[in-house]
Amino acid sequence: MELKKCARCGKFFASDVDVCHECEKKDLADLSKLKGFFADNYVVGVSKNEISSNTGISTRNLNRYLGYEEFSGIYIKDNNNDNEELANSKFSL
Ligand SMILES: [Zn+2]
């Protein structure tokens, strides 16, 4: 194990994961909200801002989660002014 800086609160900690022990719980809660959002409310072309306001997840954390392997098949645009590449996002749980 190495000493890492928590991706969520910035605290240093020793672990194999990206966030410290306290933030891990918050991450898990966020991730289940995010998965619930994708399962129930996902529409093609939804923006990160919209997901953030729907789930209460900060866009900073959202960007981190969307980089995870499990969300690699999904494309989320940064904001509503970006109309490119709306289509072909696929996601299944
Ligand atoms: Zn932390």
Image (spheres, rainbow, N blue to C red):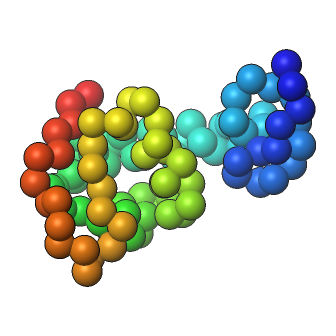
Apparent side of residue 54 relative to residue 42 in the rendered image (left or right): right
Hey, which residue is sitting farthest bottom in the picture?
Answer: 81
Apparent side of residue 82 relative to residue 65 in the rendered image (left or right): left
Q: Quadrant of residue 43?
A: bottom left
Note whether residue 13 is visible. Answer: yes
The front one of 59 and 25 is 59
Q: Quadrant of the N terminus?
A: top right
Q: Residue at x 33, y 73 (%)?
A: 79
Number of marks drawn: 0
Hey, which residue is sitting farthest front in the picture?
Answer: 84
Residue 87 horizontal/vertical position (percent): 10, 54
Is residue 18 positioned above or below 11 on the image?
A: above
Residue 59 horizontal/vertical position (percent): 50, 63
Apparent side of residue 46 relative to residue 9 in the rendered image (left or right): left
Residue 35 horizontal/vertical position (percent): 36, 40
Is residue 54 positioned above or below 65 on the image?
A: below
Note whether residue 22 is visible. Answer: no
Apparent side of residue 52 relative to residue 47 in the rendered image (left or right): right
Q: Quadrant of the C terminus?
A: top left
Is residue 24 positioned above or below 82 on the image?
A: above
Hey, which residue is sitting farthest left in the picture?
Answer: 87
Q: Residue at x 46, y 42 (%)?
A: 67
The front one of 82 and 71 is 82
Residue 25 horizontal/vertical position (percent): 66, 37
Hey, which residue is sitting farthest top in the picture?
Answer: 1
